[in-house]
Amino acid sequence: MKIYLDTGNIEEIKHAAETGLLNGVTTNPSLIAKEGRPFKEIIKDIAKMLSKHTKDFTVSAETTSTDWEGMVKEGLAYAKYDKHVIVKVPLTPNGLIACQKLAKKRIRCNVTLCFSPNQALMAAKAGAYIISPFVGRIDDHGGHGMDLIEEIRTIYDNYEFKTNILVASVRSPDQVRDAALIGADIATIPYKIFQKMFYHPLTDKGNAQFLADHAKYQAALAKK
Ligand code: G3P
């Protein structure tokens, strides 16, 4: 399963990319707005940062038009920023028209704001490269986000759709585990969750014990 960082913050991306375990970055207009820098500059900087660590990565850049013509225009411009850019369009009828138009021009689309299996089916039929179901927001509203991931996995497998399932709106490491167990293709996660995924208290405890025993043993040897 690929791991993406869900952020527009270049420092977070730098730290995560240094681990060599990051496969991409997703942004959205809310994340970009937090950075207070021009959109184009942020997307290009992200691509530049990731390219220092891997050749195989994607950066999702979201359109903000509401008509498909505008989304296509934005998408064509974004694709010129960097060859790793994926154009994010909303799961609306216009978003799916834009997705088809861009796919015909070999520009990959990440169809975002997916909350139902039927929406995911429509996105796959429109040639989406990525579908982004928002599990956390479903849970926030009393639903079961991971049930949606299972349903989309079944639908895509039934018809051999190649669209990648990207689990978005992740709130905990447990959701990343569940995504991997279901067989999602990608999870995009906030930096805090990325950091938590390395952590287990028994790893720290065990490591401290091993290092202490090693130091004791070395000290004993030195006395001989
Ligand atoms: O980028 C899309 C998605 O991951 C947003 O997550 O936390 O705003 O629901 P959130």
Image: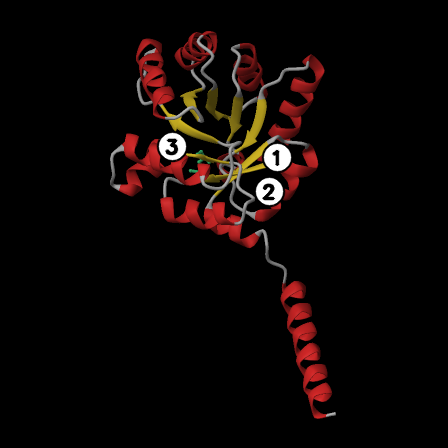
Q: Residue 146's mark?
A: 1
Q: Residue 84's mark?
A: none
Q: Secondary structure at mark 2?
A: helix
Residue type for callout 3: Asn
Ranked by sequence position, the earlier of labels 3 and 2 is 3
Question: Dividing the image into four equal quarters, which quarter contains ligand 1?
Answer: top left
In the image, what residue occupies the spot 58% across and 27% down? Answer: 165
Q: Position of residue 96 (x, y in %)?
A: 45, 12
Q: Which residue is mark 2?
A: 175
Quadrant in which the N terminus appears: top right
Residues packed near mark 1 inside 10 Å, few (<14), some (14 to 19) or many (20 plus): many
Is 204 placed left or right of 66 in the picture? Answer: right
Residue type for callout 2: Gln
Q: How is the image coloured?
A: secondary structure
In the image, what residue occupies the spot 43% across and 44% down? Answer: 13
**Which of pointers 1 and 3 indicates the residue nearer the eye?**
3
In which quarter of the view is residue 184 placed?
top right
Q: Secondary structure at mark 3?
A: loop
Q: Position of residue 85 (x, y in %)?
A: 42, 26
Q: Which residue is mark 3?
A: 28
Q: Is residue 143 visible?
A: no
Ranked by sequence position, the earlier of labels 1 and 3 is 3
